């Protein structure tokens, strides 16, 4: 490749490298994928786009994350984040994944700090911010029993999720609705809990498991009358 490649040359070379790397990862050939780092580093240097190396490192982080090797995933996400100065939206993705890794390791304080970084990044995808709000809502109630804070963050998540925008996850959206319903239920806000259980059910997607749980929770709720007028 020329010393000053054109944008098209960079895209073609990146596509070629990505195809090789993903083939290695899909085959479980992690060492071979890792050994591609010098090629990505060279492409990033030649093109003046450090974020290309960052994307490679994030992909390695994703592989470890999918294998539930969260400490190893953290190393790659943190390394990738340091190379993403030219791409704020992807900085948000990396920060969110770092927060999830800490959550799975039951390190709630670190997770909350990284979720705050996501939410402070105004260039982060709207649906990514929604996911960060939902995870914060979950941590607030599960780890600290802070119901008002949890409800607030879940409401922010539900309000932000938008299927017409990038980074949307219908599973994440439905999970936020169910988390909100469950938190309202535990806080004895029965009428509001009923409303959100019904929204989960109307949304469908039984494959995620939330519909069945919402139906079960709603049936239990209906056995008791709301003590509030």
Image (cartoon, helix red, strand yellow):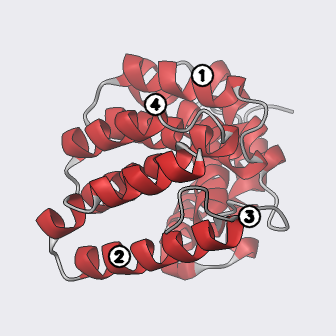
Residue at (54%, 65%) from the top-left corner?
A: 2
Front residue (pair 192, 153): 153
Q: Is residue 103 visible?
A: no
Of the numbered discs in the image, which one, if any, rests on residue 198?
3
Of the numbered discs in the image, which one, if any, rests on residue 82?
4
Looking at marks 3 and 2 on the same chain, the residue that comes earlier in the sequence is marked by 2
Residue 82 image offset from top left, x and y in percent: 46, 31
Looking at marks 1 and 2 on the same chain, the residue that comes earlier in the sequence is marked by 2
* Alpha carbon separation for disc pair 4 and 3: 43 Å
- Label 1 vs label 4, nearer the camera: 4
Answer yes or no: do the residues labelled 4 and 3 have beta carbons within 8 Å?
Answer: no
Of the numbered discs in the image, which one, if any, rests on residue 116?
1
* Alpha carbon separation for disc pair 2 and 4: 22 Å
Answer yes or no: do the residues labelled 3 and 2 have beta carbons within 8 Å?
Answer: no
* Above or below, comparing residue 208 to residue 226 in the picture: below
- Label 3 vs label 1, nearer the camera: 1
Q: Residues within 10 Å of mark 2 (few under 14, many from 20)?
A: some
Residue 7 image offset from top left, x and y in percent: 70, 65
- Quickly name the residue at label 2: 22
Looking at marks 3 and 1 on the same chain, the residue that comes earlier in the sequence is marked by 1
Please tell me in which quadrant of the rendered image residue 178 appears.
bottom right
Residue 77 image offset from top left, x and y in percent: 38, 41
* Above or below, comparing residue 5 to residue 154 in the picture: below
* Alpha carbon separation for disc pair 1 and 4: 18 Å
* Alpha carbon separation for disc pair 3 and 1: 30 Å
Element carrying mark 1:
helix
- How many tags in the picture? 4
Looking at marks 2 and 4 on the same chain, the residue that comes earlier in the sequence is marked by 2
Answer yes or no: do the residues labelled 2 and 4 have beta carbons within 8 Å?
Answer: no
* Alpha carbon separation for disc pair 1 and 2: 31 Å
Residue at (32%, 72%) from the top-left corner?
A: 21
């Amino acid at each position: 490749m020329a010393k000053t490649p054109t944008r098209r040359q960079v895209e073609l070379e990146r596509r070629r490298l990505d195809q090789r790397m993903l083939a290695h990862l899909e085959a479980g050939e992690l060492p071979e994928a890792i050994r591609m780092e010098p090629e990505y580093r060279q492409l990033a240097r030649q093109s003046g786009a450090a974020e290309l190396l960052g994307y490679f490192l994030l992909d390695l982080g994703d592989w470890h994350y999918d294998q539930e090797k969260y400490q190893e995933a953290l190393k790659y996400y943190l390394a990738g984040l340091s190379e993403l100065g030219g791409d704020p939206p992807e900085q948000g993705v990396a920060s969110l994944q770092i927060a999830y890794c800490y959550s799975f390791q039951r390190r709630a304080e670190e997770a909350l700090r990284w979720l705050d970084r996501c939410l402070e990044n105004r260039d982060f995808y709207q649906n990514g911010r929604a996911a960060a709000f939902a995870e914060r809502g979950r941590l607030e109630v599960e780890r600290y029993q802070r119901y008002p804070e949890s409800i607030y963050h879940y409401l922010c998540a539900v309000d932000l999720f938008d299927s017409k925008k990038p980074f949307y996850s219908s599973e994440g959206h439905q999970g936020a609705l169910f988390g909100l319903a469950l938190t309202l239920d535990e806080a004895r806000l029965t009428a509001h809990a009923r409303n959100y259980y019904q929204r989960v059910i109307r949304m469908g997607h039984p494959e995620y498991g939330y519909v069945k749980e919402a139906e079960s929770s709603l049936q239990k709720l209906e056995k008791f009358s709301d003590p509030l007028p």
